[in-house]
Amino acid sequence: MTMLETRSVSKCYRSGRVPDVWALDGVSLKIARGCFCVLRGSSGSGKTTLLGILGALERPTRGQVLLEDRDLRDLSDVALTRIRRRMGFVFQGFSLIRRLPIGDVVTYPLIPRGVSRAERHARARRILDSLGLGHRITAESESLSAGEQQRVSVARALVSDPEIVLADEPTSNLDPINSREVASLLQRVNEAGTTVIIATHDENLISIATQVIQLDSGTVTACSS
């Protein structure tokens, strides 16, 4: 079953001072439910933009995005927020809340869902232990290394048991050992039924993907599965 589909999606970033920049140009693809999908390509190929559009973080300039055959094009911002609650996001810039213990940072997405504080703490402990950060649960994000902050962002994406995980270079700030641990965790999450979509250059992640989409200058040049 198709989980996400794009039909002739293009994205233009406009500025009055420079020519229009088309980050995506006529992208059509299908991603199956339960797939481990990798978006690969050089810097500037459109990977991050496509990831944002698939995650309903951005609207395309032209074309359609469908989630389980539901066209997202005409949905309100409120409806798109509900859609995004079915997803977990790993941002390249971490986007962690400063001056909060990382246990609270990880479980922040659970607060609007009415999850009790005790349950939030238990979930934070489990996911942080699995990423080797259980001993830092009370530390603030500013005190962590870049690699530790990356792992916290992965934990936050997974803590709500999302149907879809979208990750932008989730291992880019990690040493080889931690990179393999994150890749293994994402693979286990995928094997449990979660659809995983990653923009990456990491060969460890590419090697375990069930679908690889190659992008170049905003277009899909190859798709293997």
Image (cartoon, rainbow, N blue to C red):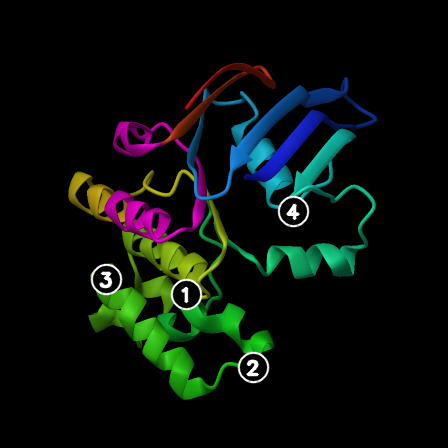
Residue 114 x %, y %:
56, 81
Say which of 8 and 77 sits in front: 8
Label 4 CA crowd tier, 10 Å (few <14, some 14–19, many 20+): some
Q: Which of disc 1 and disc 2 is earlier in sequence?
A: 2
Residue at far top of view = 221
Residue with the mark numbered 1? 159
CA separation, marks 2 and 1? 14 Å
Q: In which image quadrant can residue 204 be found?
A: top left
Q: Three-letter amino acid code at disc 1?
A: Val
Q: In which image quadrant can residue 177 be found?
A: top left
Residue 94 x %, y %:
44, 52
Q: Which residues are magenta?
A: 183-209
Residue with the mark numbered 2? 114
Residue 133 x %, y %:
24, 64
Residue with the mark numbered 3? 130
Residue with the mark numbered 4? 57
